[in-house]
Every structure is written in C-alpha cells, then in structure tokens.
C-alpha cells in the first residue's frame, strides 16, 4: 500500500486494491480537554460527501508511542488498513503527550474525542449506531481507559473496545515483561515502557489508579465488548491477556487472540505487526459479530 500524507484541510485518495472503494483521508482538528484542539485524521471509504449511505459504526483510534511519543503519521498506514479492512470510517486522534502534560491529560483528551465523535455523525459519515474505541500500545491503554471513563461518566455509549498489544501495567510485573525483555528482537522494550510510564505517571500514587492501570481496576463490570490482541514474543503479551481474563470474569464479552511473534525494535513496529499479520481479519470478524 502506498502512503500519502494529507495536508490540513485536504482529501487524498490512497492507492488501494481496486476491489475496494478508494480511501479518502482528511486531516481535521477536534476538541480536546487538556488542549483546546487536537490533530485528527479521518479515513473513509465513502468517496462522495453526498452519498446516500453512511456507516453504522465508527472506530476512534489512538496511536502508539509509550505516552511520550508517536503521531498520526506513524500510525497512518495501519489506520488506512483498518478502514479498508473493516469498511468503516476510522478517526485517528492525537492526544496530549506526557512531555506536555502527564496523566490524566491524555485520558481526558481521549474521552473528549469520543464525546465529540458521538455528537458529529454527519461530519464523520456515520449513523451513530455503534461507537468503537481502539488503540495500539499506549493507545490501547487509552482505549481501555476511555471505556472505563465512558461507563463512569454515563457516556458516550460504546459498542466495543479493541486493544492491540496494550500497555496496561505500569508496574511492569507480568511474566512476559520479565522473561522476554532480554530476548533477541525485543531487548530494551521493558526499559522503553518504564521510561514512558515515568514521564506519564510522575506521581507514584497514580500508577495504581484504574485510569492509568486498567489491570488494577476492581470495577470491570458493564464495559463494552472487548477484543484484545497480544503477540507471542511481545513483553506486553501477558498484561493484555490477563486483562482479558479479568474482563471475562466480570461478565464482559471478551475475545483474546495471540498473534505470531514479530520483531519490535522500533516505535511503529506494533503497527506493522498488526497490519501485516492476522490482526485486521480478527478485528473485522469481531466487529461483524457485535
């Protein structure tokens, strides 16, 4: 798939498989909480603003970067593939990084984006029927946390949460985090996670807050259906799978799938993993079954 980056206020047609509708990519600004506005990018397979049909679902996606980095551009190819693979519009939203403001700024931004998306059906070309929160790595944390916040604050109603290799345990205590960190191909991942958490959670007391560490939450009932994708040789593997087990125990409809091992030496690696392996088909099948 070729990659092209939109300039503000423009629509671009991605080069895609001719068997699927062309992809329209539009940069926009959306309201935040910690920041007045946040950069976002809408991916849609609807080529005409006047088209009679709109999607019944919208995916709001949060990028990777360990809370201290990452960008819409780094997750661009995955977001394109997600829109094409599901046939749904995808709103990829930025959030306040820890170098600007630490926790809970990113959490508040994520919830604000979901609230805005729920209210702007026409702008985002969807019907308002099913709102889905999704993310990779730190973005997976924000997707999980935004589901908790939406439940606790009475909205917006979410149909599902999709957590792709999520960061859920600031304590870095899982077996896979300890066992795999020195393995070839993933050396230093635990150090990178620890550095990200130090920036995001400078107050030690915040590291057990459920909005920072969903794995520590004692209240997991009444959450939307969840798809959790882990990877075989990823130090983050066990915390995602443990969270899935806890959701199931709380009565939340949850599907946990483990992807094949992949190298994870750089920031966008998890996006490549999710794009190039079975993640997209798992996500499409999960959404179809909602």
Image (tube, rainbow, N blue to C red):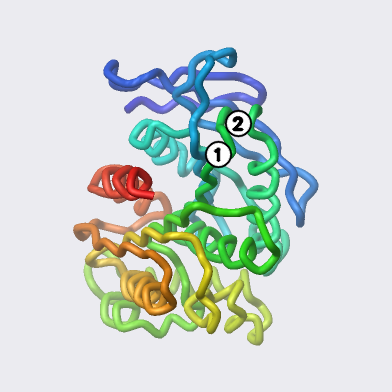
Q: Measured along the vertical axis of the image, is residue 154 above or below residue 48?
A: below
Q: Position of residue 32 (x, y in %)?
A: 73, 49
Visible residue check, residue 188: no
Tell me the number on the disc at residue 244.
none
Which residue corresponds to mark 1?
A: 91
Q: Position of residue 260 (x, y in %)?
A: 19, 58
In this picture, residue 138 sits left or right of residue 107: left
Q: Position of residue 96 (x, y in %)?
A: 67, 55
Give me the residue at 49% from left, 27% from top.
44
Which is nearer the eye, 87 or 12?
87
Check if mark 1's residue and mark 2's residue have beta carbons within 8 Å.
yes
Q: Please tell me whether mark 1 or mark 2 is closer to you in this view.
A: 2
Visible residue check, residue 128: yes
Which is nearer the eye, 87 or 38?
87
Label 2: few (<14), some (14–19) or many (≥20) C-alpha neighbours in 10 Å: many
Q: Secondary structure at mark 2?
A: helix
Q: Earlier in the sequence, mark 1 or mark 2?
A: 1
Give me the residue at 33% from left, 58% from top.
265
In this picture, residue 96 sits left or right of residue 283: right
Which residue corresponds to mark 2?
A: 124
């Amino acid at each position: 798939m070729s990659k092209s980056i939109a300039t503000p206020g423009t629509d671009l047609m991605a080069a895609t498989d001719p068997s699927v509708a062309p992809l329209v990519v539009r940069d926009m600004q959306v309201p935040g909480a910690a920041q007045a506005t946040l950069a976002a990018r809408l991916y849609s397979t609807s080529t005409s603003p006047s088209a009679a049909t709109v999607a019944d679902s919208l995916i709001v996606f949060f990028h990777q970067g360990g809370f201290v980095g990452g960008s819409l551009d780094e997750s661009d190819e995955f977001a394109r593939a997600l829109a094409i693979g599901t046939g749904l519009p995808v709103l990829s939203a930025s959030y306040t990084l820890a170098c600007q403001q630490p926790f809970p700024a990113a959490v508040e931004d994520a919830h604000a984006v979901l609230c805005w998306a729920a209210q702007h059906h026409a702008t985002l070309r969807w019907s308002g029927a099913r709102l889905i929160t999704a993310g990779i790595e730190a973005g997976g944390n924000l997707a999980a946390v935004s589901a908790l916040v939406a439940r606790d604050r009475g909205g917006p109603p979410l149909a599902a949460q999709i957590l792709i290799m999520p960061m859920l345990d600031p304590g870095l205590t899982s077996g896979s985090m300890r066992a795999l960190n020195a393995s070839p191909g993933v050396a230093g991942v635990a150090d990178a996670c620890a550095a990200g958490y130090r920036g995001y959670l400078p107050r030690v007391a915040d590291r057990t807050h459920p909005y920072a560490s969903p794995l520590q939450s004692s209240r997991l009932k009444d959450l939307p259906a969840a798809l959790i994708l882990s990877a075989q040789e990823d130090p983050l593997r066990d915390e995602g799978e443990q969270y899935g087990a806890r959701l199931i125990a709380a009565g939340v409809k949850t599907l946990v799938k483990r992807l094949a091992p992949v190298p994870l030496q750089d920031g966008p690696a998890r996006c490549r993993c999710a794009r190039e392996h079975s993640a997209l088909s798992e996500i499409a099948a999960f959404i179809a079954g909602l």
